[in-house]
Amino acid sequence: MSTVFVTGGAGYIGTHTCLELLQAGHKVFVYDNLSNSSRLGLERVERLAKGSIEFIEGDVRDGSTLEHALRHSQCESVIHFAGLKAVGESVKNPLIYYDNNVVGTYTLLNAMQATGVKKLVFSSSATVYGEPQSLPIEEAHPLSATNPYGRTKLIAEDMLRDHFHAYPDWNITILRYFNPVGAHESGLIGEDPKGTPSNLMPFIAQVAVGMREKLNIWGNDYPTPDGTGVRDYIHVVDLATGHLRAIEKIMPPQCIELNLGTGRGYSVLEVLRAFEEASGKTIAHEFFPRRSGDVAACFAGTKHAESILQWRAERNLKTMCADHWRWQHLNPAGYASNNDFAIKNAT
């Protein structure tokens, strides 16, 4: 098995991917500045995998520390998660997003070039498609962005494509996520948003556990079956296995873009009802006018990832909600709960 260097590996998708990598026998180095994550998540990954992770605290924009860490790891490949991801925050503080997401990727590419590491799996987003012109959204869909977060991902993608054009012996896989949700079935690792959640399911979960009064639903007059927005939600463990396949798949030097989604959409109200069923809680909610920039529906075309990676999302909405609720119920304050209750009740 290989050695994999994971930037941002202590975060939500990072921890789940590190678990899949360890369980598949890979050696894992995590490089993370812990600005939006916790060491406890990695400790729980080690417990679940009965393996160890070498952790290096550092910022992806710190070129000298990053290059030293890459040399030390002697890795064959890199998975790049490190970056900021909240759309609303990117509108309020765009320069922070360009610094973290664009400069961070530029610095990583330089460090990889200096150390001779030429295989990269990049964490991108369906936001690079902008307003959907057709559904499902295939990888050939025109690219655009409606917010600074999406633009930082698009700029980073362009940088990777230009880099491959200059250095065609690289192997770059760009994974465009749709809407990651859920948690590991153990309840030990999951999403731990700082402050107010910017995504639907963690917000619903916090209402269910009593941390928040109600869910605000932005728009109930979209041209969808129940008037609320439709999105492609993918279980985070399915997403993690997609990264594992991208690392393990032997492919020729190339720069390729792949969607990771389920290929079907669920409305806000469908997710809310499914979470109520999973949790046994009533989710208080209130409708508000649409938010600027939100689209009616967005879901992935998945045949390309199925063909290239031999990968398909397996978990349905019921499982997504049940696993997310188990995590939230056992860890009501996320990793800050840090008590034995979650571990004793999950193992």
Image (tube, rainbow, N blue to C red):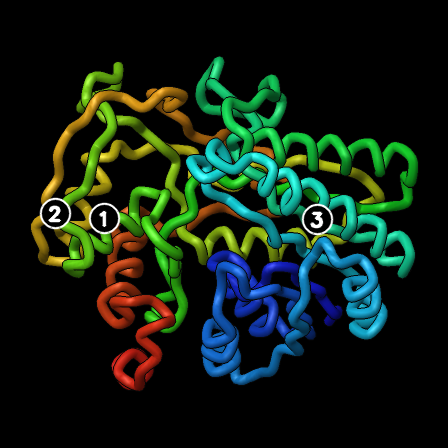
- Indicate whether 274 appears above or below 49: above
- Viewer-nearest residue: 144 or 262: 144
Mark 2 belongs to which amino acid?
A: Ile
Per the image, the residue denoted by label 3 is 104
Of callouts 2 and 1, the N-terminal one? 1
Say which quadrant the N terminus sits in.
bottom right
Which residue lies under the disc numbered 1?
204
Q: Is residue 338 left or right of residue 239?
A: left
The residue tagged 2 is 283
Q: CA distance from mark 1 to mark 3?
A: 32 Å
- Contact between marks 2 and 1 (CB within 8 A): the answer is yes
Residue at coordinates 91% horizontally, 56% vertically from top-left? Answer: 114
- Please tell me which residue is depicted at 62% across the width and 64% down the height of the picture: 32
Give the alpha-carbon distance from disc 3 to disc 2, as whole Å: 39 Å
Percent coordinates x, y for residue 283 in the rendering: 12, 47
Quadrant showing the C terminus: bottom left
Q: Quadrant location of residue 255?
A: top right
Q: Position of residue 252 (x, y in %)?
A: 83, 44
Judged from the image, the secondary structure of the residue bearing numbered disc 3 is helix
**At x 55% / y 23%, what residue is drawn?**
145
